[in-house]
Image (cartoon, helix red, strand yellow):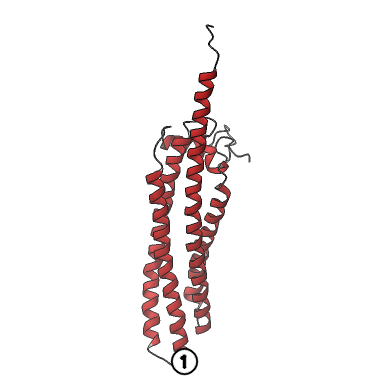
């Protein structure tokens, strides 16, 4: 199915050739030069802080769990209480992960909406800015890496929570969790860097388009003359 030529994001409806993304995007915002600084700062700050705190804490908990399982293998029975305590905090962190994911999606929508409002002021920029920006592909790769980390953590929790039956499996689970948390943190930082670049690229394109339009009006021949 062909993608919409206006936004280059969603496919065209087979029934009438319209685009659902364009309709929703235009319904959310009105074309206008609005500041993207606030929305960008909240998105960047929220992404870095939320993912660093949530997944950083998760990585630390699983690293401590890994060490506690090692102590248990060496005969330290007090490690059982440590492991149970860590698993309780892991459950709390799991729900914090789910909540942070929803919050970050909303923050990204707010940033994209601000970009759409600016982009819609220029017909030659439009909603395709999100796909045509030079940094867009790198931004999307970081987001795919972030999504991979999220989904892998969900899979591990479903697969290992009831299936891990020995110390070796628990330690393997802990190692994988630490690795995936590191992936999510790195991807979130990469996402915010590219979001800054995309914002600068969009505003530069809009400014250039406005300047070109003003120049064209000034140099346009007077019909009366």
Q: Residue 68, located in which quarter of the rendered image?
A: bottom left
Q: Residue at x 55, y 13 (%)?
A: 221
Q: Residue at x 50, y 29 (%)?
A: 211
Q: Residue 37, located in which quarter of the rendered image?
A: top left
**Residue at the limit of the structure toward the right, as seen here:** 1
Q: Residue at x 52, y 43 (%)?
A: 130
Horizontal side of residue 118 vs 225, given as left or right: left
Residue 207 lies, with reference to residue 87, above or below; the image says above
Residue 140 lies, with reference to residue 214, above or below; the image says below
Horizontal side of residue 140 vs 95, given as left or right: right
Residue 97 lies, with reference to residue 38, above or below; the image says below
Q: How many marks?
A: 1
| Pointer 1 residue | 74
Query: Label 1 crowding class (10 Å Cα cut-off): few <14, some 14-19, many 20+?
Result: few
**Residue at the limit of the structure toward the top, as seen here:** 224
Q: Residue at x 49, y 76 (%)?
A: 174
The x and y percentages for residue 177 are 49, 71
Which corner quadrant holds the C terminus? top right
Which corner quadrant holds the N terminus? top right
The x and y percentages for residue 86 are 39, 77
Disc 1, SS:
loop
The x and y percentages for residue 131 are 56, 43
The x and y percentages for residue 94 are 41, 66
Q: Nearer the viewer, residue 170 or 131?
A: 131
């Amino acid at each position: 199915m062909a993608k919409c030529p206006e936004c280059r994001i969603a496919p065209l409806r087979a029934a009438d050739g319209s685009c659902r993304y364009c309709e929703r995007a235009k319904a959310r915002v009105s074309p206008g030069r609005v500041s993207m600084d606030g929305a960008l700062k909240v998105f960047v700050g929220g992404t870095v802080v939320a993912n660093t705190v949530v997944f950083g804490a998760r990585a630390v908990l699983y690293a401590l769990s890994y060490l506690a399982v090692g102590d248990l293998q060496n005969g330290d029975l007090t490690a059982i209480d440590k492991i149970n305590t860590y698993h309780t905090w892991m459950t709390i962190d799991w729900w914090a992960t789910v909540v942070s994911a929803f919050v970050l999606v909303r923050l990204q929508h707010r940033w994209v909406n601000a970009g759409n409002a600016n982009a819609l002021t220029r017909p030659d920029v439009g909603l395709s800015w999100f796909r045509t920006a030079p940094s867009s592909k790198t931004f999307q790769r970081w987001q795919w890496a972030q999504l991979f980390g999220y989904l892998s953590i969900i899979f591990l929790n479903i697969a290992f929570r009831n299936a891990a039956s020995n110390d070796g499996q628990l330690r393997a689970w802990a190692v994988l969790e630490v690795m995936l948390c590191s992936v999510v943190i790195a991807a979130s930082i990469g996402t915010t860097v590219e979001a800054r670049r995309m914002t600068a690229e969009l505003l530069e394109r809009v400014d250039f388009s406005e300047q070109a339009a003003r120049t064209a009006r000034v140099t346009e021949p007077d019909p009366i003359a």
